[in-house]
Amino acid sequence: MRIGELSQRTHVPTRMLRYYEEQDLLRSDREANGYRDYPESAVAQVELVRGLISSGLPTRLIKTMLHMEGVQGEELARTCTRNLAEDLARELETLESKIACLTRSRDTVRSFLARTRHAEVLGDARAVLGTVA
Amino acid sequence: MRIGELSQRTHVPTRMLRYYEEQDLLRSDREANGYRDYPESAVAQVELVRGLISSGLPTRLIKTMLHMEGVQGEELARTCTRNLAEDLARELETLESKIACLTRSRDTVRSFLARTRHAEVLGDARAVLGTVA
DNA sequence: CTTGACCTTCACATAGATGTCAAAGTCTAG
DNA sequence: CTAGACTTTGACATCTATGTGAAGGTCAAG
């Protein structure tokens, strides 16, 4: 598919899709006329990248992880040096702490909304909450 | 405590502590001489703010959430309008999706490292991993 | 009183993610 | 052939979170 369609389907502006490509987070083939051509899988890829970037991960890490998702068994021995493994272990801790932090905040918001629901007896917030629980 | 101590204890530069205050994410009293004076609780507060910012949350949201953590029961009815509740419900979805995204990435890194550990028979990465499991 | 280690505010610089616009090529419909 | 929709690259603007440094107060130690 072309960039316009990918953009519509992911709700990510074409500007950003080109930017991700420039940052090595997304690949594309080219049609004879030079237009970018994306495979179906690009949709998922873009969604993943978006999520990670919006979660504050450095593109460097995202690039590494995207690469990992593709790599298979034996290939690893050659690919992953000890230093890289250590780096990744550190990144893993970063991820864990981000998750913990967001989880805590999610719980805060959740319980706040729950209490609000009680407070607002005729609460229309209930409808909203319904879409979340 | 003063800003220097808070900075050392949180590993957050004083520049940022003042910035957070400017953004309404952190409060401080003032000594007679104008120096900022923080309570013990500021340490935890700063750590929370750091975690959220590093997770890509907009300061606007963080401000809201920090406020919520303080608010109690009855006060809510007055504080939380329907629109705010709807906003928060949306933010909650944002949090959920960030968490999901980070969790997926964490699992990716984890399983990569696990496989790596097999590949590197003498893997020193194991020691590193131990601190993570 | 002076020095040094703090603190204050203010301002300018930077890096990353994004918005926006311009100039120009491609292609399809009329 | 032309108009309109879509594409390309490239440049410039903006916002946020930061780094950095200037100019100047506070205060304890020597």
Image (cartoon, coloured by chain):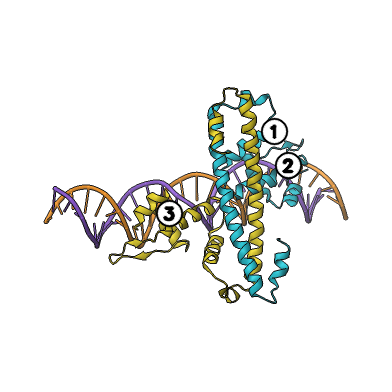
Chain colours: A cyan, B yellow, C orange, D purple
Helix or strand or loop: what does disc 1 sit on?
helix
Q: Are marks 2 and 1 on the same chain?
A: yes
Q: Residue at x 65, y 48 (%)?
A: A51
Instruction: Residue A91 in the image: state x and y as whole percent.
Output: 55, 39
Give the chain letter at badge 2. Answer: A
Residue A28 is situated, as x and y percent measured from the top left of the image, at 71, 38
Q: Amino acid at mark 3?
A: Met
Q: Going by the image, does A72 lie left or right of B30?
A: right
Nearest the camera: A75 or A110? A110
| Amino acid type for the residue under numbered disc 2 | Ala
* Residue at the disc numbered 1: A70
Q: Quadrant of the N terminus of chain A?
A: top right
> Closest to the observer: B47 or A20?
B47
Image depth: mark 2 or mark 1 in front:
1
Residue found 37% across the figure and 66% down from its top:
B29
Please identify the quadrant where the C terminus of chain A is shown.
bottom right
Q: Disc 2 vs disc 3: Cβ atoms closer than 8 Å? A: no
From what the image shows, is residue B121 above or below residue A66?
above
Same chain for mark 1 and mark 3? The answer is: no
Nearer-the-camera pick, A38 or D12: A38
Q: Are marks 2 and 3 on the same chain?
A: no
Residue B16's tag is: 3
Q: Secondary structure at mark 2?
A: helix
Q: Chain of mark 3?
A: B
Residue on which the image places disc 2? A42
In the displayed structure image, the side of residue A94 where residue B93 appears, left or right: right
Q: Earlier in the sequence, mark 2 or mark 1?
A: 2
Residue B50: x %, y % from top left: 49, 53
The chain letter under disc 1 is: A
